Amino acid sequence: MNIFITGASKGIGRATALFFAEKGWFIGVTDVDRSGLAKLEKELSGKQYFAAIMDVTDSDGVAKTINDFCAKNDGKLDVLFNNAGVAWMDPFESVPLQNHHAMINVNVTGVLNCTFHAFPYLKKTQGARVINMCSAAAHYGVPWEVTYSATKFFIRGLTEALNLEWERHDIHVCDIMPNFVDTPMMEPCHSKVVENVGIKLTTQDVVNAVWKASHKKRVNWLVEFFPYNILQPLAQYTPRFIVRSIMKKKAGL
């Protein structure tokens, strides 16, 4: 079995790579962070892996890298894990426009590039999976992380639509929807929502969900802690004005 991971040099990507490597999988690790990737390669020493510097926003580079990885796996791809992402959490107007664009380019265009170019190899692989890193921010638009939240709505929509469309190709598409996770991406994020909700999930909590998603079929994998593990599933049955009121309170507005 093999898995191709984007944004693998740190956080959830790194933890996933190390976990799957221990399970005996052939690991494809990619990132734009050259030094972080080099460090991960040292940790993967003795395991079966493929590593490459790859910018998910570069369509041609993505196509070449996925092709190179699959060439080492008889043209097959068991799991594509679209994990690469960036986030800035501040008032919308305080976030530089280039950062808004970066979130769209990495979180949206990057996933499109990887999923599109991976399709021929996924189609050739029995029981292939696409696992997209989504977020609890895709349940309801989150203040202070407006564009990030919007990109995750895109990921959820893409996931649910492709889950239906690619079933005819025996490709299962799903997403992982965690609340705030203790990763390097969250270190500069100190919005009121983060402060009120808290960062209580670990990378291993998310990895456990990714592992299940690589074997079992579910569209949205919720990764939560109390009381949100109860509130999030109930939210779909709750009148939107109540959900909006709760979100407003959590955001300190």
Image (spheres, rainbow, N blue to C red):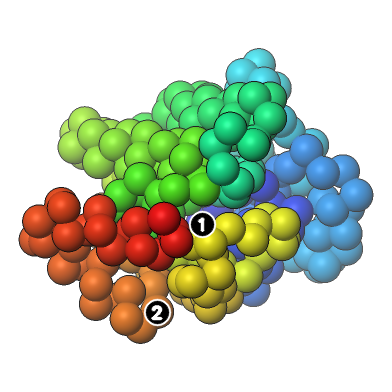
Q: Residue 101 location, x and y as percent?
A: 61, 25
Q: What amino acid type is highlighted by mark number 1?
A: Met
Q: Height in image: 240 above or below 64?
A: below
Residue 189 in view: yes
Could you say which quadrant of the image residue 23 lies in? Answer: bottom right
Residue furthest out toward the bottom: 226
On the image, numbered disc 1 is attached to which residue?
1
Residue placed under numbered mark 2 in the picture: 225
Q: Quadrant for residue 191, please give it.
A: bottom right
The answer to whether residue 33 is left or right of residue 240 is right
Mark 1–mark 2 distance (CA, rounded to whole Å): 31 Å
- Give the number of marks: 2
Image check: 47 left or right of 191?
Answer: right
Judged left or right of residue 9, residue 176 is: left
Percent coordinates x, y for residue 18 in the rendering = 68, 68
Q: Residues within 10 Å of mark 1 (few under 14, many from 20)?
A: few
Q: Residue at x 46, y 71 (%)?
A: 197
Looking at the rendered structure, the secondary structure element under dot 1 is loop
| Residue at x-position 32% and y-position 81% | 227
